[in-house]
Image (cartoon, helix red, strand yellow):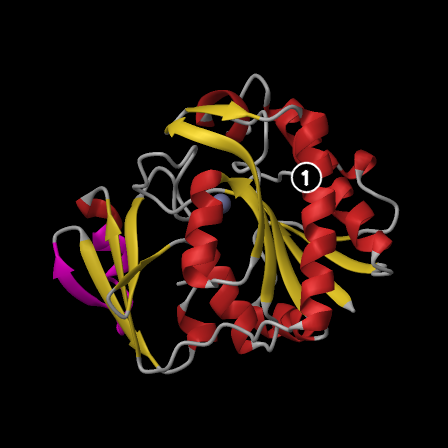
Amino acid sequence: MKVLMMTDLEGVAGVVTFEQHSYASGKYYEEAKLLLTAEINAAIEGLLQEDVDDVLVLDGHGPGGITFEALHPVAKLLHGRPSAPDRVRNPIFAAYDVAVIVGQHAMAGVADGNLAHTQSSRHIDSYTLNGKLIGEIAQFALHCGALGLPLVFLSGDHAACREAEALIPDITTAAVKQGLSRNSAISLSKEASRLLIQERIQLAIQRQREQPLAPLVWDPPYVLEKRFFHTDSADAAAQAPDVERVDSQTVRLRGDDILTLIYR
Ligand SMILES: [Zn+2]
């Protein structure tokens, strides 16, 4: 089995504030990267226990969330921004069998979601796809689903795990912290978090071998609404010819191909 591993910084134990941990200017940003890298390494140790040794790690955090020097020797890392085009990335993703996520946060607007946001913490109020609120978990799961990969494991805070389970009821999760508010949480220790991730991802692979989860696919046609905090963001988004303006802060996009729509 070949595993595609999305990663993010805001769902890692010990990472708790945007200002200090998540932004590249943060006082503890470098430490936060080491914490994510160690959680990734724990996940890879769990995969190795299941004889999975082909792991492509995706750095999903805007300014970079991984300390390359500290990354597990088995891991290959896909990184760098701006991202390569989808026509380059999608065939690479499609060569993998299953997808997992390490370090995920909940969608924007979730009260107990520590560091909850959708794509841009400074600009996006909400994404709605076919009438359902979605966040980064659904975006990645649907993108991978269209490429034939089921999302079988997620680690993050409790709210992110809950969001994943609502989307994919039989997914295996590992909650490494309990969000109390947007910039406050109760984290497990780094040791407890890493052990939990290692054990749970191992279980996810075992479950996938016994009773495989299907890739997540929603039926087209798709209507994606993006609501911004500020009108100028909506002004910019509405410049594209295929984008409808819904109201001062919201735009709407339509399409039948989830791959070209979901990350717009
Ligand atoms: Zn994120």
Quarter the N terminus occupies? bottom right
Residue 238 magenta-highlighted: yes
Q: Which residues are magenta?
A: 234-247
Q: Position of residue 176 (x, y in %)?
A: 58, 35
Q: Quadrant of residue 108?
A: top left
Residue 68 magenta-highlighted: no
Q: Position of residue 58 (x, y in %)?
A: 66, 53
Residue at point 47%, 62% (across, down): 169
Looking at this rendering, what residue extends furthest in the left direction? Answer: 247
Q: Which of 61/140 is in front?
A: 140
Looking at this rendering, what residue extends furthest in the front direction? Answer: 210
Pointer 1 residue Cβ closer than 8 Å to ligand 1: no
Q: Which of 33/209 is in front?
A: 209
Characterize the local packing of mark 1: few (<14), some (14-19) or many (20 or more) Cα atoms within 10 angstroms: many
Direction from residue 236 to residue 56 in the image, left or right: right
Q: Dot 1 lies on which element?
A: helix
Q: Position of residue 64 (x, y in %)?
A: 62, 40
Badge 1 amino acid: Leu
Residue at point 31%, 82% (across, down): 221
Residue at point 55%, 27% (across, down): 15
Asked whether residue 159 appears in the rendered view, the answer is yes
Quarter the C terminus occupies? bottom left
Q: How many marks?
A: 1
Residue beneath disc 1:
196
Q: Quadrant of residue 91?
A: bottom right
Above or below 146: residue 205: above
Residue at point 81%, 51% (across, down): 75
Above or below 24: residue 237: below
Q: Position of residue 46 (x, y in %)?
A: 78, 49
Asked whether residue 92 appears in the rendered view, the answer is no
